[in-house]
Image: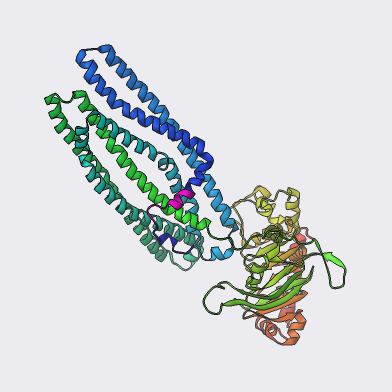
Amino acid sequence: MSLHDDDVVGKAYDARLMRRLLEYLRPYSAPAALALAAIIANSMLQLAQPYLMKVAIDRYIPAGDLSGVNRIALWYVLILLTGFCLEFTQTWLLQNTGQRIMFDMRMQIYRHLQRLDLRFYDRNPVGRLMTRVTTDVDVINDLFTSGVVSVFGDVFTLAGIMIVMLTMNWKLALVAFAVLPLIVVVTQWFRRNVRESYRTVRRLIARINAYLQEHITGMPTVQLFRREARAFERFEAINQEHRVANVESIFYYAVFYPAIEIVGALAAALTIWYGGRSVLAGTLTLGSLVAFLLYSQRFFRPISDMSEKFNILQAAMASSERIFKLLDEPVSIESPAGTAKPSRRSATSEGTEREGGHIVFDHVWFAYNPTEAGEPDYVLRDVSFEVKPGERVGIVGATGAGKSTLINLLLRFYDVTRGRILVDGVDVREMDLAALRSLFSLVLQDVHLFTGTIAENIRLGAAEITDDRVRAAATAVHADAFVSRLPGAYAAPVAERGATLSVGQKQLLSFARALAFDPRILVLDEATSSVDTETEILIRDALHVLMSGRTTIAIAHRLSTIQDMDKILVLHKARLREMGTHQELLALRGLYYKLYQLQYKDQEGKDTKEAKDTKELTKELTKELLGSQNLP
């Protein structure tokens, strides 16, 4: 898929796409067949009504046969009642089938979206993907409820009317059919113009969805930088384009339907002119003329209906083209056949067994766009290091050095371009994805909370995590203190993206979530940034609980958060430049030393009175905070 796939205009009718669409109808072939039978039966009844009028006028009314007229009236009422039942049956069956197909298609799309890798989402706006799942699927529903089956009723009605009219009086029938060339011209004009207009409307709908999703999500930034007027002008322009495209399509409809009515009226006038002369000449009965007029009215109704169904077909072709392009997007990261599962325990260098969590990066190279012409822009170059089970490793480096990329590769959100990554002796590309990711808990700087309750955001649907385990995890990371004050406590509702919670509270909930899942490996990505000092103290204490007995990888900009790590990796310009403990790296006087100087240049080599006062104040604040919450 591309960012502009909505601009592509495909075929008016694509048999390949239609075959794929009909596959969704296959599981519901029985109700569809029953609906088709009801449609055909109803069409036959519609053919009988004008003929009953002919019989009544020609046979019973001139003879004064009241009982015959009564019989005709009774048959007419029975036909209407039967037609009502058949219409209800086919409408119910088709609408129900359409809803089921729409449900199946949305589930298939969403299942596929969950399997696609992050590289796909990097290049596809969320708003357009939402359009695929919502609006485009609605259009496919229209095809099945109003098009693909019911069109047979229109075809049958047209064929039946033509046969009956030619049988009754072929000359008069040809007079009535004389306007068909006009119908063809008007219909072709309508189809050609409406098709292009409709595609424009669909493209602009997708653009509106993408724009709204992006700017509503980024509303704080819009308001902060006072971009409301500019954003409004841009949205007004897109919305204006959409309105103009819709008005243009309305124009074509406004011309087409009255034109069909005029052509139908012209056919009726020709029928009266020629048929009236035949009646006066005695070569045609009055009942036959009335029947012809009724048949001609019914003849042009399915033509206009079929033109509308052609528009539905065009819409379905455009929408199905985009849906199938999404469904055909290859899943580049998936579990291979015969996947290996990591062992629960691994051996240390001393030969003793410890809990798993052994990580090895072996000459890893990675580029986000490896297929570009020329030399790829590698964000990691020949990176090799080892994290032993239970070891705590910090990763530092300038923005863009490749720190977060290491995490993305480790969790296999992306695959390495060259080299390999081992977890407990198994290449991550050979492991079952679910098994691999179940080893990790990831705590990000920007915590994502879902609409629901506090407990649901900690548990995330894992049935094995009991309420007691949720509460224990929250207590261990100091989240219970603020949760217990919320109305409903763990049943308290969480707004979209956790809008009603502070940054620190969301961060503590993310720690509780990580602990509740009891991971073998803990990954922290700037987990203590963007919070106040008091919350940071609680978070640091929670981190000690989280990291206990687990392999930990922590990305940090503030060196104070990783100084006590067992090992620190320094990335610079896509390469691993330095590795060691805090003191060892300072002794090297290299990149890490320069980073340390930049952050602590005012305190290097001396311990001023202000620094001492700060340390004492931090200690007192820690005791006060932890003591006030009855924490260990």
Whether 22 is drawn above or below 274: the answer is below
- Residue found at x 25% / y 34%: 296
Number of labels in the image equals 0
373 horizontally vs 545: left or right: left
Q: Is-magenta flag for residue 12?
A: yes
Depth check, front residue: 538 or 155: 155
Depth check, front residue: 295 or 309: 295
- Residue found at x 27% / y 43%: 257
- Provide residue 425's location: percent of width, then percent of height: 77, 68
State the predominant SS element of the stretch in magenta: helix
**Colouring chosen for the image of the structure:** rainbow
315 horizontally vs 455: left or right: left
- Provide residue 571's location: percent of width, then percent of height: 66, 79
Q: Is-magenta flag for residue 155?
A: no
Residue 539: in sight, yes or no?
A: yes
Whether 364 is drawn above or below 485: the answer is below
- Provide residue 131's location: percent of width, then percent of height: 47, 54
- Provide residue 176's location: percent of width, then percent of height: 21, 36
The magenta stretch spans which residues?
Answer: 11-20
Depth check, front residue: 151 or 519: 151
Quadrant of the rendered structure where residue 303 is? top left
Depth check, front residue: 279 or 315: 279
381 horizontally vs 77: left or right: right
Whether 337 is drawn above or below 559: the answer is above
